[in-house]
Image: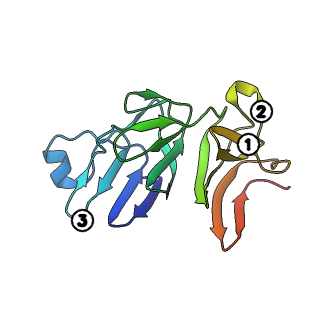
Amino acid sequence: INAAVRNASTIYIGGRFTSVGESSAAQGADFEGLARFDGFDWRPLEGGGVSGGDIRAMAVGSENLYVGGSFVRVGNVEVTRVARYDGVMWHKMGQLDGDVQALSTFGEYVFAGGDFVTSSGGANEVSHIARFYAGFWQQLGTGVDGTVYVITPIRDCLYIGGSMSQ
């Protein structure tokens, strides 16, 4: 398990695993790196899990679950390391050229940090931290010079941490 978030009474966990707990393994459920706890038992998400990598970051906002990592598919949707789950199905969220290590929601935005430097197939420079808005990843300022591992909003500020010097 690499990441966990809570949305109301549901807990979500993500990482690289195929079972969670004894009862879910006995039921033969395949979690594919993603599970939810509904207060009684761990269950796979109805839209499916990830393949081609693992989940390293999760966030919730506006009744959506956001996952990021090194994966290339979630459920039956081809993605590029980041996706949105609306409770029923998965949605692609643009392209990032490296792994997503951190996710956070802040207001109407989703923020991602990680090993990536461009989005949209190399068309936009994002330098390790980006904001998703209006269907595209946008760079924050001039970005940073190293991997972002943590993104935390506090009041009206966004704090980041990682292996960078500027």
Q: Which residue is mark 1?
A: 138
Residue located at (52% from left, 48% from top)? 56
When the figure is inspected, residue 159 is found, relative to residue 148, above or below; the finding is below
Q: Which residue is mark 3?
A: 39
Three-letter amino acid code of the residue under disc 3: Gly
Residue located at (31% from left, 45% from top)? 45
When the figure is inspected, residue 71 is found, relative to residue 3, above or below; the finding is above
Residue located at (47% from left, 36% from top)? 91
Q: Which mark is residue 33?
A: none
The quarter of the picture where residue 127 lies is top right
Label 3: how many Cα within 10 Å (few below 14, some 14–19, many 20+): few
Query: Of label 1 and label 2, which has the lower sequence position?
Result: 2
When the figure is inspected, residue 72 is found, relative to residue 22, above or below; the finding is above
| SS at badge 2 | strand
Residue 22 located left or right of residue 139 = left
Three-letter amino acid code of the residue under disc 2: Asn
Q: Which residue is mark 2?
A: 124
Residue 88 at x, y percent in the picture = 34, 42
Residue located at (36% from left, 47% from top)? 87
- Front residue (pair 31, 11): 11
| SS at badge 3 | loop
Three-letter amino acid code of the residue under disc 1: Gln
Q: CA distance from mark 2 to mark 3?
A: 42 Å
Query: Of label 1 and label 3, which has the lower sequence position?
Result: 3
Query: Of label 2 and label 3, which has the lower sequence position?
Result: 3
Labels 2, 3: front one = 2
Residue 137 located left or right of residue 19 = right
